[in-house]
Image: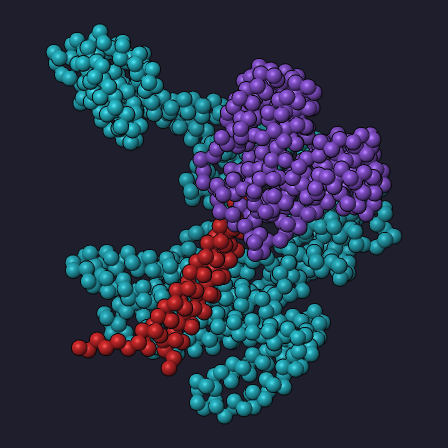
Chain colours: A purple, B red, C cyan
Amino acid sequence: MNLLRDIDSPGFPNDYLITRIKGRRAALITDWKAVRAHGLAAGIADERIWGALLSELEWLYGQMNRALRECFAPVFVLLELKTIVLCLRNKEAHRATEIDTLLTHTLLADSIRLVLRDQPDVPASITTLVETTAEALPGLGEAATAYADRGLRGFEDSLMRGYLAHAATTRSHPVIQQFLRAFVDLRNVMILYKQLRWGVEDAGAFIDGGTFELSRLVQLNSWEGLAKEAAGLRVLPAAANQGALETVLLTSLTGRLRQSGRDNLGRNSDGVGLILDYIWRIYVHARNVAVLYHAADLGEATLERELIA
Amino acid sequence: MQTVMNLDKVLLAFAAALSLGISAIATAWVQSRIGAAGAGALAEKPELTATIVIMLAIPETIVILGFVIASMILLGK
Amino acid sequence: MSKVEVAGPREMLLPVLETIQREEILQIEPGIRERIREDTAHKLRPLALDTQVLAERLVLEDLGNKIGRLLTLLPKVPTKESNLSPSLAVDSIASLVGTHLDACKERLQRKEALQSELGQLQRYLVFLGAIELLAPKGAAAADRELIGIEAKDPATLDQLAKVADRTLPGTVVTSAKMEDGSYIGLLTTEKQLANKLRDGLRGSQIPEITLPSYLDRLPLPDKVKAARARRDELSTQVAAIDNELIDMARKWRAIYQPVQSWLEQRLSLLKTSASLYETDLCFVLFGWMPSATVAGLRQVLAEQHGDAVVVEEREILKQDLETVPVVLRNPAYLQPFELLVRLLPLPRYTSIDPTPFVAIFFPLFFGMILGDIGYGLILLLVAVGAILFVKRRIIRQAGEILLVSSIYTIVFGVLYGECFGDLGTRLFDLRPFIDRQTSLVPMVYFALAVGSVHVVVGLVLGVVSALKGRQTKEAVYRSLSILVVICVTGILASYFAPVAALVRGPLITAVLVIIPILIFTGGFLAPFELLRDFGNIISYVRLMAVGLASVLLASIANRLAGAAGSVWIGVAVAILLHAFNILLGVFAPAVHALRLHYVEFFSKFMEPGGKDFKPLRLAKDKMKEKHLANGHES
């Protein structure tokens, strides 16, 4: 079973898509300082921000040819897991219109969409989802159990972990695989950070599939180890809190993706790196706009920390 | 029987055909990529039409060079 | 270009802007402010509009939107110029536009509804016509019932026929193909079985054709008649609405259009205020204008607004050079060729305007490639037609380029002795000076010679522009590479022209002497740069190769025509193939000649990155042009 929507059109050649992406990339905000100085455009709200992100992803997916669609499926699914969780959360709060908005642009397959739209409540949705898609979506089974124990947060966490571990270890395009592994690393560093912070040790919390051996992660039981080995940073960010660390890590991941997007010779001439970079850029863009929208009055220092350059 | 094969001539003709044919294929390949990219650029910026038409003609140098080589092979002694 | 600063009392801002807009010679550039003297910079701040002006802007924008929408809805009809003054009419128009928009929308909705019913009816009519053909006649029809169904695929109908035959004996399935490619089937069955059959159809999701209620009860022939009557009625209604809309358009377009262009103008004026600055009492604007026009503007401003408004010229700084807008300024007979230069990014302010060279070489290359008296004459006619009868400036300019190119085509046609390929030779015994089809090698040399000249001209321009930019070392390097190019060309030529063999020795010595100096001025890669120049020259072989293809195609057209047997078929084939060849023959030489300029020629001396000069101007001309273009379409 396919997790993503089936599209009839055969899509377009890679070169076509790459040029279009290069054209569109220019429209994204890069000078966040200027935006901070002048403020965002009027009429922005959370739904708009996510809607814009999703519709851009939908556009991208529609333009891709079959080979690219297949190649990028793990990335899209990774992003769409968030949609599933958001829908369930809205279902919990009985906000049907929000669910509809979320589902208009989503790339999820129709079967999943119908479940998310039509099932009356969260447990029923999860049960039906497990019945229909458990095979195709690794981690869903455990997530359902986690929901019974810890509610939606547990569900989200478990689903993400299950899927990431599966996706990072499944064979895919080298650039995509690299990205997924880096993503797993990022999550693992965050987990390690939390464990150090709260002084707990739980080897089972780490996600398999990253570039670090799990056993090695468990041994890195100090702040210096975290900083030097895992995060690849020389010093911990000055205000060493969770948000700042995450921003630093995300920024470094952004930099790495941009590098792979720029390198389009030889083996990478198929443009996968560039497209991945674009997906990540619009994701980061949406995240930054959201941060600016919510934290506009939190002061310069906070914003400086939170924005991914 | 007058159909004595002149192997030299055949080889020369074959070489000329190869030099023109392969360079034509190369041009076609490059043009297909430029065409696809050009269509993409057009979709984003329609004002580039003229530039893209010119861009499309640029790789034709390859086939012109192939033609030059081919005629050198055929006409040169 | 001159960098100017215009300053005056704040209350005179809008009138002064209006004057500047009317003159159409000044481009406002807010960025310049960053580069003026430090001591005054801090007193300037971006101009804030007062509330009254802001309110005006909002009202006008809203009105502009409404009028724009109305104008897109109204059918396009040619209108007369109205001499109503838009600025006075705006208020009354503002109260009218809402009603007009509503009326127009309402009509269009009605029309759409009618048209969709009409479309439906059309299908019924086809269906009824098919029934008339398929249905059993006379007494047999009495106790039978007809059920019409629609299917996209004839296989469905076959299937249905089989099933019906098995389960409901006495049912006859007949089918007919409709115009749109779908099929209709007619099930003829006994009255008592009809309902059972209907249920079955519903179950298998085959849509039954249901007629509208007013047709339901009538007997078949009357059904057709009633449907036709209804169709005619609908058509008249649609036509009536169309007429109403056209009347409305005739009456109001002439009024709305000038108002719309006035609005655009006014709005563009109000919007420019965002790029102005103010001090406590004055407004200040910075901008670029052609140096020759500064005195004129100063005079006009003084006449209209007294000596309170000051125009000052400022020195162009080095960091300004990036942003100086560029105007291509050429004599009238060269201006059309600016079109070809503008296809690429403009040359930088300090670089050389290549238009004159394009004007010389482009038609030459075009003619060299196409070179055919017949094709040239046809293109000449097309060009003259475009110049005389088309009002759009850009097409007229293209026509002028084509005119010059077609003359060269005729000249080269005479040289090559070609008129519609070899037709001229066959019919009028036209004798070529050079026969392109047989003398390949001389043609290649000719093309290469032209290429060498073109590239060397480009290189010389490169030296000039390096000198202009005071890059002496670069200029020396470029001159040396010209020398090498000329020497090497000479050496190569000496192998083909026996007389020149004498100079081979000195030329080789010269090259050996120059190359070390070249490396000294241009770095170790300099000799490899030279290779690029030679590659460029070889690229000019296309002048001959593309032309050869075109001439062969033309003579194939003639040969095929000759082989056709019948005279008329032969003539038709010839016309068709020659027409095709002319299309190719315009496109290919144009693209290749352009490409030789853009890639081989411009790269030698031109630095891109110039900004187009966009002075604040009245929107009217653009509107008029658009309006005319629309008039031609409708």
Residue sitting farthest toward the right: C39
Q: Position of residue A226 (x, y in %)?
A: 79, 41
Q: Tell which of A139 and C175 is nearer to you.
A: A139
Front residue of C281 and C73:
C73
Image quarter (top left, top right, bottom left or bottom right) of the C terminus of chain C = top left
From the viewer's perspective, tell me whether residue B21 is left or right of residue C30: left
Please report the residue visible at 64 percent of the width from the left and 58 percent of the height from the top: C610
Q: Residue C176, position in %: x, y?
A: 22, 26
Please indicate whether residue C248 sits to the left or right of residue C584 in the image.
Answer: right
Outermost bottom residue: C502
* Quarter where residue C528 is shown: bottom right
Position above or below: C507 against A212: below
Number of callouts: 0
- C377 or B50, which is in the foreground? B50
The image quarter in which residue A50 lies: top right
Q: Is residue C69 above or below residue C129?
A: below
The extreme top residue here reads C192
| Res. C72 visible in picture | yes
Residue in the picture at 35% in, 65% down:
C550
Q: Residue at x 62, y 59 (%)?
A: C327
Q: Within the image, what quadrant is residue C377 found in?
A: bottom left
Residue at the spot 52% in from the left edge and 43% down from the top edge: A68
Question: For the N terminus of chain C, which image quadrant?
Answer: bottom right
Residue C580: x and y in percent read 33, 57
User: Above or below — where is C325 with respect to C79?
Assistant: below
Classify residue C124 as left or right of residue C80: left
Q: Position of residue C121 (x, y in %)?
A: 31, 22
Is residue C623 in view from this perspective?
no
